[in-house]
Image: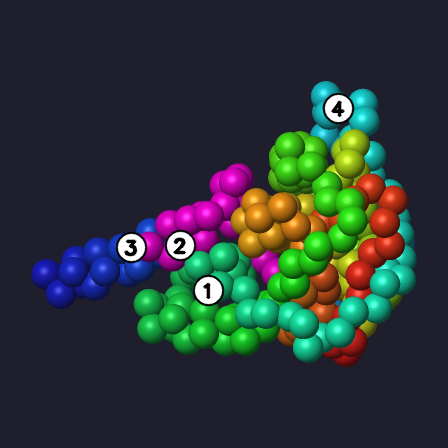
Amino acid sequence: MKLVVVLAHLLGLAVALESTGLERRARHPHKRTSRPKKYSGAAAMRAPNKPPNCPNEYRTSLGKPSQHRAKAALKQVPADLIDPDVQRRRESFKAMQRLRSQAQASDFYECTNPSQVPSIADCDVVVEQVLSTSDELVVTANSCLTFSYNTCQAFFCSLCETLITTTDFIGNELDTTEALCLQNGQAGTIVGEDAPQWDAGFTYEGQPLPTYDVC
């Protein structure tokens, strides 16, 4: 009985430490959610919903990536900023460690220094609105969702095939991009190289959206 109690305590501690790591540098609390999944249904792509009482200047729309960037410029996302699938939290501590190690090899990022960088205050508003939506969205191959407020344009693109995702996951990734790039005065993108491949990040409003050869 004591052994069971000790093991339960250790597992709870492991999950707590994992949660702390995920939010160590985050500006917004991360939602517990699943990563994008391949989608083969019949649902059509649409613009994301907007939460009630959002600012009048907040807009959502559809787009296409057009700025091709080199995969070689990508860096590995730190382990404490990677969001694993929510169902993984039910696995053992060793299994979570193994899955986290796998995730480290799959999520990458790039910070850039364009002539115009979005305001971090504007991007904060975007992240808050995205995380307040609780929307599920289909994104077709080589297509993007965009979320804009004043100088800030956020995006989430499917790079290779049709996928389904949530605004919870998108908001988490945008918040991570803030931690990695915007807080240093740069624009930035996170790329998920596990199928279905995707990218998410921030540009100045109206600038082209990036894509990477990861298919």
- Compared to residue 163, the image places residue 12 above or below, namely above
Disc 4 is placed on an element classified as: loop
Label 4 sits on residue = 55
Quarter in which the C terminus is drawn = bottom right
Q: CA distance from mark 4 to mark 3?
A: 39 Å
Label 3 sits on residue = 12
Q: CA distance from mark 2 to mark 4?
A: 31 Å
In the picture, measured across the screen, residue 102 lies left or right of residue 38, that is left
Mark 1 or mark 3, earlier in chain? 3
**Residue 21: numbered disc:** 2
What's the residue type where badge 3 is placed? Gly
In the picture, measured across the screen, residue 116 lies left or right of residue 102, that is right
The image quadrant of residue 140 is: bottom right
Query: Do tag 3 and tag 2 residues touch (Cβ < 8 Å)?
Result: no
**Residue 106: numbered disc:** none
Q: Residue at x 64, y 70 (%)?
A: 74
Query: Do tag 4 and tag 3 residues touch (Cβ < 8 Å)?
Result: no
Q: Is 183 part of what is drawn in magenta? A: no
Q: Is 23 part of what is drawn in magenta? A: yes
Specify start and end residues of the magenta stretch as a single range.
17-37
**Residue 79: numbered disc:** 1
Mark 4 or mark 1, earlier in chain? 4
Q: CA distance from mark 3 to mark 2?
A: 14 Å
Q: CA distance from mark 2 to mark 1?
A: 8 Å
Mark 2 or mark 4, earlier in chain? 2
Circle 4 Cα neighbour tier, 10 Å, few/some/many (<14 / 14–19 / ≥20): few
Circle 2 Cα neighbour tier, 10 Å, few/some/many (<14 / 14–19 / ≥20): some
